[in-house]
Amino acid sequence: MKTKNEMKESKDPGPISQRENGGRNFLKQERRPSLSASLPSSPLPVCHCRVSGLGLQTHLSKMTINPTYLAQRTRSSVNWTDARARVLKSYREWLRASPEIQTMYSLNMPVSAIRTKVRQEFEKHRYVKQLGAVDVLLFQSHAEFQETLNYWKQLSHVMKYFRPEEDPGARLPPNFISGFLEGRN
């Protein structure tokens, strides 16, 4: 056993050891160097999924996980002008990210089809007349955007927007039984 003076002089924490302190025994845990000390001083690059020659799985396995990427604070719109500006900003973000979404999820459809579907989703809520409802829709839109671009979704989650029954011009079954037999909801 080391004396108190030897312990003060010794900077080496050593492995888990038992020390005596005034008749009481307790475990002294090994100190590990902090993770930030071993990392380079420059931050690691965050992938924006512009894949160049790498397969998607290889590319994603080398990505740095940054859960705050694309995070925003929730806020309310001050007036209709502010709400309109926020909606247009969100819409433009979706349109700009369409090629990236196509690449990330390996979608076998043109970017124009993705942009058309984004437009249809925004058009669904075109005539919402309550400012609070617009704020909720903006929050939901941004949550979807963040989950999509952070690759927190699977392919089936993205493809649910492209089901035939989601198409506004889709033929509705004439009655419940025929719809049930077709396998539609």
Image (cartoon, rainbow, N blue to C red):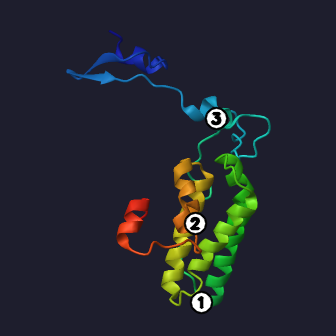
Q: Residue at x 71, y 59 (%)?
A: 98
Mark found first going from the N terminus, 1 or 3: 3
Q: Residue at x 37, y 24 (%)?
A: 29
Q: Quadrant of the N terminus?
A: top left
Crowding at dot 2, Cα within 10 Å, few <14 / some 14-19 / many 20+, comes out as many
- Return the residue at label 2: 142
Say what amino acid the circle numbered 2 marks.
Answer: His
Say what amino acid the circle numbered 1 marks.
Answer: Asn
Crowding at dot 1, Cα within 10 Å, few <14 / some 14-19 / many 20+, comes out as few
Q: Nearest the camera: 20 or 157? A: 157
Give the total of numbered labels: 3
Where disc 3 sits, the SS reads helix
> How far across and down, in percent of the image, does residue 174 sit?
43, 75
Mark found first going from the N terminus, 2 or 3: 3
- Distance, label 2 to label 1, CA atoms, is 19 Å
Q: Nearest the camera: 97 or 76? A: 97
Crowding at dot 3, Cα within 10 Å, few <14 / some 14-19 / many 20+, comes out as few
- Distance, label 1 to label 3, CA atoms, is 44 Å
Q: Residue at x 52, y 66 (%)?
A: 165
Residue 174 position (above or below residue 129): above
Q: Nearer the viewer, mark 2 or mark 1?
A: 2
Res. 152 in view: no
Where disc 1 sits, the SS reads loop
- Return the residue at label 1: 79
- Return the residue at label 3: 57
| Left or right: residue 65 compared with residue 4 | right
Q: Nearer the viewer, mark 2 or mark 3?
A: 3
Work out which residue is located at the far left of the displayed protein and give it. Answer: 23
